[in-house]
Image: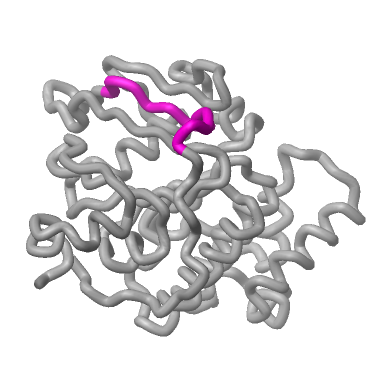
Amino acid sequence: MRSDSPRVSNKPSPPNSAGSSLLEVAGLNSHYGPVQVLHNVNLNVCPGELVALVGGNGAGKTTLLHMLSGLHRPSAGSLHFDGQEMTRWPSHRIVAAGVCQVPEGRQIFAPLSVEDNLKLGAYRLRRNHDWVQQEMAHVYTLFPILQERRQQLAGTLSGGQQQMLAMGRALLGKPRLLLLDEPSMGLAPLLVEEIFRVIVELNTQGVTILLVEQNARAALAIAGRGYILETGRIVKTALATDLLADDDVRRAYLGY
């Protein structure tokens, strides 16, 4: 795994352990045909938390996010969001409930402008023009380069700018839970630092975040709690600071 870590301050505090979960994953199994990818995964995220899920390539991280977004059905177990079971909900209902994902690889709409990509993020809310413009202004505050490039075709942006756009598009959906899938992938260290700075800022503003990352050091440096996923199994969970100090985690994921 990459060992670079962004220099981000204002790390979120761990939540009150007595708080109820916004997201609860219980006994989750997943198969692709005869191959089992996830094995009895248990995970929870409380309101206001920034939780990191880290693991190597092929650990099952993206599969878990696909199930949270309704793109892949579990073969066993349950998913609850804000007390409601959403295990069999279709994707559009999950998004309508406030679960918004920033997918691995950005997946922006390349032929459309930056501004039109952002507007698509607000489509389900069907708000008026003034509301959309206000929310876009907030995204432009977080990512000033997007305002500068707002009429530019999204496919001509750099990789880092496309990642900013993908995050901005998700924010236009007013997420109650923001799912981030490998936001540092393929980015230069300075861009990773900028992306992670914004993630911390969003969490400080009250956005609940599940951050899925292969870059364990960077993710755990900003998270309140963390989960370690290996070959489809949660093998460790603790406060992020404890995981960073754990000898097994350091050897396996942090390179020292």
- Left or right, 122 with respect to 176, comes to right
Q: Residue at x 33, y 68 (%)?
A: 218
Tell me the quadrant of the picture where the N terminus can be found: bottom left
Residue 6 position within the rendered picture, expressed as x and y whole percent measured from the top left: 38, 76
The magenta stretch is 17-28
- Left or right, 251 with respect to 106, comes to left
Q: Say how the picture is coloured.
A: one colour
Q: Residue at x 37, y 27 (%)?
A: 25
Q: Residue at x 71, y 82 (%)?
A: 148
Residue 121 position within the rendered picture, expressed as x and y whole percent measured from the top left: 67, 50
Q: Is residue 104 above or below residue 198?
A: above
Residue 202 position within the rendered picture, expressed as x and y whole percent measured from the top left: 60, 60
Is residue 143 visible to the viewer in this orientation of the structure? yes
Depth check: 225 or 93 in front?
A: 225
- Left or right, 116 with respect to 78, comes to right
Residue 18 among those drawn in magenta: yes
Q: Residue at x 45, y 50 (%)?
A: 14
Residue 101 among those drawn in magenta: no
Residue 186 position within the rendered picture, expressed as x and y whole percent measured from the top left: 33, 72
